[in-house]
Image (tube, grey):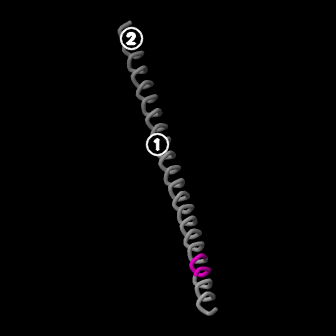
Amino acid sequence: MKRLLSIITVVSFFLLHSCRESTQEKTEEAVEAIGEDIEANTREAGRKIQEGAEKIDNEVDEELQELESRHNEVNID
């Protein structure tokens, strides 16, 4: 009887240990996937910010050119 109880205890220990390792591995994989998602989203946000800044820069340049053109027309007349 003691032997059976000892065997059950040892088997239970290994099963619990295996479940813990499995849970830890799944947690590590999930954290890694979250990190990769954050990295990809950060890159995408940076790209969109850059595009927006370039668009604003182009619009400002166009407005400046238009103002210079108007200024030149006023000075010529």
- Asked whether 9 or 25 is in front, the reply is 25
Residue 62 or 24: which is nearer the viewer?
Answer: 62
Could you classify mark 2 by the number of other residues whose Cα lies within 10 Å: few (under 14), some (14-19), or many (20 or more)?
few
Please indicate whether residue 42 sits to the left or right of residue 3 in the image. right
**Mark 1, other Cα within 10 Å: few <14 / some 14–19 / many ≥20:** few
Magenta residue span: 63-67
Mark 2 touches mark 1? (CB < 8 Å): no
Mark 2 or 1, closer to the camera:
1
Picture quadrant of residue 12: top left
Residue placed most toward the observer, 6 or 33: 33
Side (left or right) of 6 relative to 34: left
Compare residues 53 and 39 and report the one nearer the observer.
53
Tag shown at residue 5: 2
Instruction: Tell which circle, 2 or 1, labels the residue nearer the N-terminal end.
Output: 2
Q: Please report the residue visible at 47 percent of the width from the left and 46 percent of the height from the top.
A: 32
Q: Quadrant of residue 60?
A: bottom right
Residue 50 in the magenta stretch? The answer is no
Disc number at residue 31? Answer: 1
54 lies above or below 27: below
